[in-house]
Structure formats: structure tokens, C-alpha cells
């Protein structure tokens, strides 16, 4: 599923999600311990993943690289809950919900 240099992230393949909506829903449905485990495994590899992905044209990524990119998008999605809020939801946001209606095509 992922490039061989990133095989240690395979246990987190359930975070390979194709849209912001799916990533946000996964974040809301996940516990902090699960997000922390994903963050702890993926964050140290972020620079290496970015360097690796930069060697491919964005509009022609092989499937393993596309999966790696989507996994890194999910890492971004969990970074604020882990680093700042200490909870999956945006603090003091009540029932407010923002839904992306268009996003970049990859």
C-alpha cells in the first residue's frame, strides 16, 4: 500500500483517506490514544515523506506514493488535536460544523 521505505506506517493504513470529509470524520470517530499512536509513528517521517514525494510529479503519482501523500494529509488532520487541543473536536465549537464542498484533485 505504501512505498517500501515507509512500511512501518502500514498499521495506520486506515488513515489513507481520499477526502477531507473522510479524514475529518475519522478524526472525530477516533480516540486520542489512537490518534496519538498514529501521530507518534508518522510525524518523525514527515520530512522524509515530503522529500520522497517531491521526486514525483503530483499529477502522476504511483499508487503507493499517492497513499503516502493521503496518509500525510491525515497526519495534518490530527496534528491540532494532538499538539494543541488534546481532544478530537475544535474546543468551544459546540455543534458547529464546516463541510468542504470542493477540494484539490489529486
Image: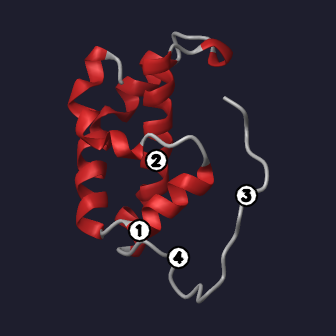
Q: Which residue is mark 3?
A: 100
Q: Any mark on residue 29, and which?
A: 1
Q: Which residue is mark 4?
A: 90
Above/below status of 37 relative to 58: below
Question: Is disc 2 in contact with disc 1, using a CB cutoff of under 8 Å?
Answer: no
Which of marks 4 and 1 precedes in the sequence?
A: 1
Q: Quadrant of the N terminus?
A: top left
Q: CA distance from mark 2 to mark 4?
A: 16 Å
Which of marks 4 and 2 precedes in the sequence?
A: 2
Mark toward the viewer: 2 or 1: 1
Which of marks 1 and 2 precedes in the sequence?
A: 1
- Label 4 secondary element: loop
Q: Horizontally, is 37 left or right of 22 in the view? A: left
Above/below status of 19 relative to 6: below
Q: CA distance from mark 3 to mark 2?
A: 15 Å
Q: Position of residue 84 (x, y in %)?
A: 41, 69
Amino acid at each position: 500500500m505504501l512505498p517500501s521505505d515507509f512500511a512501518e506506517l502500514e498499521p495506520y493504513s486506515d488513515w489513507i483517506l481520499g477526502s477531507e470529509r473522510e479524514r475529518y470524520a475519522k478524526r472525530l470517530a477516533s480516540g486520542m490514544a489512537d490518534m496519538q499512536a498514529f501521530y507518534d509513528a508518522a510525524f518523525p517521517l514527515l520530512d522524509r515523506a515530503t522529500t520522497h514525494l517531491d521526486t514525483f510529479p503530483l499529477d502522476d503519482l504511483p499508487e503507493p506514493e499517492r497513499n503516502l501523500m493521503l496518509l500525510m494529509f491525515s497526519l495534518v488532520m490530527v496534528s491540532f488535536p494532538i499538539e494543541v487541543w488534546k481532544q478530537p473536536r475544535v474546543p468551544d465549537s459546540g455543534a458547529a460544523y464546516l463541510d468542504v464542498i470542493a477540494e484539490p484533485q489529486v
